[in-house]
Image (cartoon, rainbow, N blue to C red):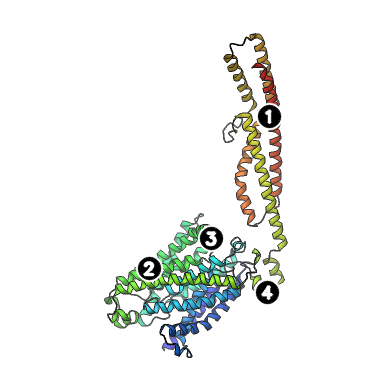
Amino acid sequence: MMIGVTSRVKDCIHTTKMCIFGFLMTFLKKYGFSSLGLTFLICSTIIQFYPIMKNIMHNFFLNNFYNLTKFYLNVEYLILSDFCAASVMITFGAILGKVSATQMLIIGIFETIFYSLNEEVATLFNITDVGGGLIIHMFGCFFGVACSKLLTPSNAKTSKDSTSNHSSDLFAMLGTIFLWVYWPSFNGALATGDSRNRAVVNTVLSLTGSCVSTFIFSKALRDKRKFHISDIQNATLAGGVAIGSCANLPISPSVALGIGFASGWISTLGFTKLQSLIEKHLGLHDTCGVLYLHGIPGMLSGISNIIIIYFLNETKFSSEQTFISIFPLVHSNKLTFQQQSINQLYCFLITLLISLVGGIITGVFVKLVTSNNNNKSSTYFNDIENFELSNEDESRFLISENQLDLERADSATNATNYTALENRLKILEEKIINLTGSLPNVNSDHPKIWNPSKIAEKNDFTFKDDYQNQNSIPRNTMAFSTQRNEGLMQSNNFNQNFNDDEIGESVEEFGEQENYLKEAPDAYGNSQNYGNIESDSMQNCNYDIKNTSAEVNDAEGMEENVEELLVDNEEYY
């Protein structure tokens, strides 16, 4: 009977790993074949390799090197193989679409070695981690994050294919729902008796808590105050991760719900706010966001387990058999619950260390022995790199190099034009400052504050001040008055040549050019992403440059007129 139950659990885990993990990764609009196909390949490879590494590591820690010719293999070992493959799948999520199939196989082999090592270390501390919150989820996440930091090409971060569409999100959502349904069997796979019942019940409660929490905070934290599909696809599952380490412990339903609710909130916060910040400031590109679905909820699982065990006592267990199956050393008085809690903490820190160091070593090795030939951004997150596609799909999936060259040329031309525009505007500013003493206040309610009448008025006051300060020089009052009137007439003629309306419009246009220049760096930054460049953008840019050139010519003409006016006025000094 037990074999039959274990076999059914094995089938559930196989379904979870082979199908549902793959479907969850199909959110990339052009990477569906690779997400499912490579999941199939990698899982099959790990299931073969893990039992070998498990026996080698186990005999190594027992100093039993003479028993390496015999390997144990049963249903439990196959379940453990599935758990290891699940951890590798989590790592795959961090580097999805950015490495080749060969590179991913190498990473999977190396991770299995470090995973088996960490598993044996956890056995030495006799920890309890029934759902793999530490051993599977946290380990796989930080191993993948370390690899992603080292192996992610810079142009992959700006690829236009690292996004989803309605159809791909629908497939990924299908994977989410099936994962949500099958997760209790995953957490309770290796538990027995009453522990299995508790693991299933606590997992279901935690999943419901994270689901409700995700919907609440997705709407609250998103700018448009609407649900976001990426939050629903991922954060709703965080409860299954967060309850993993303590799922079989005697905790109340409110605690299980609370852990699930908190994990849903933390995971949603990660997808809505932290992901963009970490990518921007730390340069960490996490394709599936495993840090926020598996990493942080896995850490929450480990911390919750440490706290719960610290305050446990044997009276909370339903039977002595359940107590023995979970904490055999505590039952035999070799450890107290508090000492067991400290062991859980040690294992938490060691798991974090081994995963990060192992990921760094693996990333460096893969980078040295394999050459990433995918230097073209069009091959990242694209099935064309791994699968033979129909002609129609190839033309739809692959961006031609000619198009990329044109986009690069357009981007460089835009950059040149923006630079020229900026230089011409600086010249215009300098000329206006030389003429008026300051730039016009283009944000004023009265756009005609700057006009030639102000210059004439300023000259008039200058003549008066000069006349009063030079009393020692005999002047003919009548002649001075006549000359002053002639100067005012010249100023009025100057004012008529440049009427207020035209000058006001020039100031307004200058303000528009100034605002446009402030937006230019953002526009140029977007063009560097080789996005869809509008066909009329260059025409608009050329039109703006022509307008600016005309303004500069007007300013130069104005400068000449004012200089002539000032030369005429020098006769008064």
Residue at point 49%, 78% (across, down)? 113
Q: Nearer the viewer, mark 4 or mark 3?
A: 3
Residue under label 4: 388
Q: Reading the chain from its start, which is encountered first: label 3 or label 1? A: 3
Vertically, is 472 above or below 57? above
Vertically, is 278 above or below 7? above
Q: CA distance from mark 3 to mark 2?
A: 27 Å
Q: Position of residue 255 (x, y in %)?
A: 35, 68
- The residue under label 3 is which amino acid type? Gly
As drawn, is 332 to the left or to the right of 257? left
Query: Number of callouts in the render?
Result: 4
Disc 1: CA contacts within 10 A as few (<14), some (14-19) or many (>=20): some
Helix, strand or loop at label 4? It is loop
Residue under label 3: 283
Residue under label 2: 303
User: Residue 97 occupies which quadrant of the picture?
Assistant: bottom right
Q: Position of residue 456 (x, y in %)?
A: 64, 22
Q: Nearer the viewer, mark 4 or mark 2?
A: 2
The reply to whether the C-beta atoms of the residues labelled 4 and 3 are less than 8 Å apart is no
Q: CA distance from mark 1 to mark 2?
A: 74 Å
Residue under label 1: 559
- The residue under label 1 is which amino acid type? Glu
Helix, strand or loop at label 1? It is helix
Q: CA distance from mark 4 to mark 1?
A: 68 Å
Helix, strand or loop at label 3? It is loop
In this view, the residue in front, 161 or 347, is 347
Vertically, is 184 above or below 507? below
